[in-house]
Image (cartoon, rainbow, N blue to C red):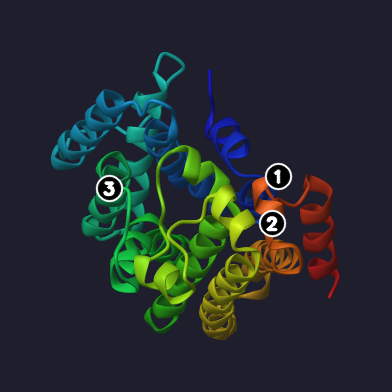
Amino acid sequence: MKTEKNIFRNGSTTYYFSSIFFPKKIKDDVFKLYSFVRVADDYVDVVPANKKAFNDLRARWNLAYADPDFSTITTEADSIDDRVIKNIVFVVRKYNFDTAWVESFLDAMQADLEKRTYKTMTDTKWYMYGSAEVIGLMMGKIMGLPDAAMKYAKLQGRAMQYINFIRDVQEDNDLGRCYFPLTELKKHGLKNVSKKTAQLQPNEFSNFIKAQLRHYDSWQQEADKGMKYIPKRLRVPLQTAVSMYNWTGEVIRNNPDIIFSQKVKPKKRRVIWKASTLILQ
């Protein structure tokens, strides 16, 4: 049986090994949230995309949440979909999430089934809101953060998602997707971010990637201002994840072409070492 831990660990090295440093009562609910997020994301990211499974999952979420008698108790007999639907309904109820957040997340996943390009940064921000900013809002609720912290929680999601776009260029090329605004590509004289284009226009491509990293830097620096709202015991996992994303950005900044040869991700030992040093501070 796939547990929340299995689903989360297989989906993200950085998030998983950062999140294990949350207190257990919070960690368990973070795992519940990410089990749903990862399963939905996996359905749209396979080749070919599993549209039926995603649509079924979305329909089941709508039915489950609308039913006040829906039980969120998981059993060994549950399928993966059974389990993650129960998990998302559980955390939505427990923390009083705005259900529009879940719908926005599912809208972004739906867009991955239908949309392949984004014309402007406004369009890209729409996608980032649904795919990442609402997850930041949900995490803020789980962590019990005050309302004043929520704008920073949203920006944290946006910043990390943009690094994912940069890191996953080759993977997204293979899926026929590009999340970077066409206006950003045009600004640097690029028609796409394919390996061939990068080889034909190395300076333009390098400048483009570094410009996208500056967007990340700007959003992350603003998101960092929200750390003051987070108790130290809860801050360690988030600071660890941010540190790993900063590291990923620096590796790519120093060698933009690396995104075509490997997926730049920190190893487990780097994540755990960073968290350990933060705990000791």
Quarter of the image with the C terminus is: bottom right
Q: Quadrant of residue 12?
A: top right
Which x, y percent locates residue 129?
34, 64
The answer to whether residue 33 is left or right of residue 256 is left
> Residue 115 has which mark?
3
Determine the CA span between mark 2 and mark 3. 26 Å
At x 54%, y 33%, the residue is 7
Which residue is outermost to the front? 200
Q: Quadrant of residue 138?
A: bottom left
Q: Categorize mark 2 by other alpha carbons within 10 Å: few (<14), some (14-19), many (20+).
A: some
Q: Which residue is mark 2?
A: 257
Q: Secondary structure at mark 2?
A: helix
Q: Quadrant of residue 66?
A: top left
Q: Which residue is mark 1?
A: 261
> Tags 2 and 1 in contact by the CB under 8 Å rule?
yes
Classify 94 as above or below 186: above
